[in-house]
Image (cartoon, rainbow, N blue to C red):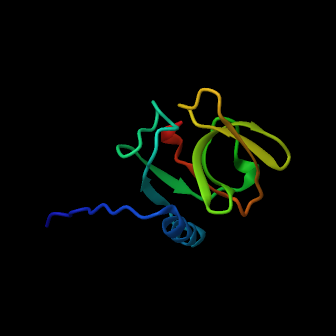
Amino acid sequence: MSRRSMQISLPNEILIPEVRHIIDNGSEVELMTKGFSMLPFIIGGVDSVRLKKVSFDDITIGNIVLAEIEKGRYVLHRVIAKDNDSLTLKGDGNIEKNVVASITEGYVLDQANEDYE
């Protein structure tokens, strides 16, 4: 029997809470990426990432994380610096734009699968 996959596109405000729920229950989630901020390593609409829950302490420089940087606004970016309670994130394709976010475990959602580093 052939297995068919179906793609649907949902707004982040609907999709991400569901993803968080699934991951909080111990599963990993694979998502198709959107956007261009991680070019050339992750291509929106072409590449997907597998996400899993990690603690803030386990995040290291170079990891790619899906993080809520303000209420309802999520980015999938690389960690370029880490302090006691904050991460500095940067999209690989963003030449000058860094995102500095004070992150607690409640905001750090997942780390992208090591295959994408």
Q: Residue at x 30, y 60 (%)?
A: 7
- Left of 65 or right of it: where is 6? left
Q: How many marks?
A: 0
Residue 41 sits above or below residue 66 on the image: above
- Left of 96 or right of it: where is 11? left
| Residue 61 picture location, percent across and down | 69, 36
The N terminus lies in quadrant: bottom left
Q: Residue furthest top?
A: 95
Residues 23 and 78: in front is 78
Q: Residue at x 59, y 49 (%)?
A: 75
Q: Residue furthest left?
A: 1
Quarter-wise, where is residue 21 in the image?
A: bottom right
Residue 83 sits above or below residue 54 on the image: above
Q: Residue at x 52, y 38 (%)?
A: 37
| Residue 74 picture location, percent across and down | 60, 54
The C terminus lies in quadrant: top right
Residues 36 and 28: in front is 36
Quarter-wise, where is residue 43 in the image?
A: top left
